[in-house]
Amino acid sequence: MTTAGTTTTAGTTTTGTAARTEEAASLSPALARQRYREGHVEPTSGRAAGFTQANLVVLPKDWAFDMLLFAQRNPQPVPLLDVTDPGATSTALAPDADLRTDLPRYRVWEGGELVDEPADVTALWRDDLVAFLIGCSFSFERALIDAGVPVRNIEQGRNVSMYSTNVQCRSAGRLSGPLVVSMRPIPASQVVTAVQVTARMPQVHGAPVHVGSPESLGVPDLRSPDFGEPVEMHEGDVPVFWACGVTPQAALMASRPPFAITHAPGHMFITDVPDAAYRQP
């Protein structure tokens, strides 16, 4: 029986949203990237479950050392997974992929100002551009689910909530800016489990940087994220905050390099590397 987007099979009811989520989770990285290359645009949370996702920052070679140093000095929000040679369009994390086309949405920056959000940056790619692939917290969401911890943004089919904070990153050369965090509502009884699970994955941001009291981070209203979408809290949930790979975008806005390309928040590069490769025993 099918009614209003709900399918019932053998006594089990699955909403249309849940079915789509399950289908997206089962995608291979290559198939997910193909969809994005063909123009499909969506947040990648919950997509190609079990495979590492990465933030993307692309800067002229003249700014590459500053970015490398910024990552070295701020490893929790900027955990580097790969750095390309100037002009390269692929990464060892997915050798057959194209960094110019295989993310669902990009951001283009000029002088620290956002000027475009295209789905393809082939025409903008230059021989002097260096790409930085940075660990993403979407990569530990499957580990949370496997541990029985609900991930509300996936349940609700929404992009994760991200907030700029009053915590300043350690500056590096010409780059400086605030820490950006992602927030996931976690049942109070499962916060310890969430901390333990994510602490085993430091290359995709690791353990939370803060639990509860968003005001302590300078976040006045969880319903108004700076990036992403608001995610509804359930009764008994506690806001838990992880360092976020959008932090370099905040640094671009503050430091105003002449040109940069990044992923659009929540629209990540899906690699061929299993999450387990970054999971400590």
Image (cartoon, grey):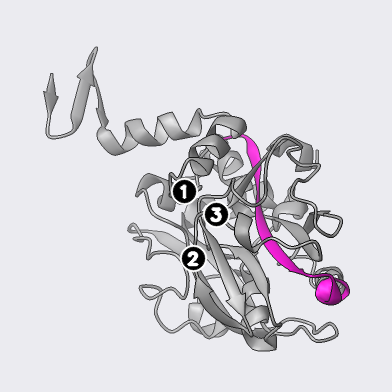
Q: Quadrant of the C terminus?
A: top right
Q: In the rendering, at what x and y percent does residue 208 appear?
A: 64, 63
Mark 1–mark 3 Cα distance, whole angstroms, equals 30 Å
**What secondary structure is found at the residue carrying circle 1?**
loop
Counting residues from the start of the chain, the first of labels 1 and 3 encountered is: 3
Q: Name the residue beneath numbered marker 3.
A: 120
Of badges 1 and 3, nearer the viewer stands 3
Q: Residue at x 38, y 54 (%)?
A: 158
> Where, quadrant-wise, is the N terminus in this rendering?
top left
Q: Residues within 10 Å of mark 2 (few under 14, many from 20)?
A: some
- Bounds of the magenta span? 49-66
In contact (CB < 8 Å): disc 1 and disc 3: no
Residue 4's label in the rendered image is none
Number of the front mark, 1 or 2 = 2
Indicate whether 1 appears above or below 159: above
Q: Which mark is residue 117?
A: 2
The percent position of residue 98, horizontal first and vertical second, equals 67, 44
Q: Amino acid at mark 2?
A: Glu
The answer to whether residue 264 is magenta is no
190 or 114, which is in the foreground?
114
Q: Foreground residue, 104 or 278?
A: 104
Q: Residue at x 61, y 32 (%)?
A: 30
Q: Report the front residue among 164 and 56.
A: 56
Q: Is residue 58 magenta?
A: yes
Q: CA distance from mark 3 to mark 2?
A: 9 Å
Q: Residue at x 45, y 34 (%)?
A: 24
Q: Of the numbered discs in the image, which one, if any, rests on residue 151?
A: 1
**What's under tag 3, amino acid-wise?**
Asp
Counting every numbered tag in the picture gives 3
Relative to 215, say whether 158 is above or below. Answer: above
What amino acid is at disc 1?
Val
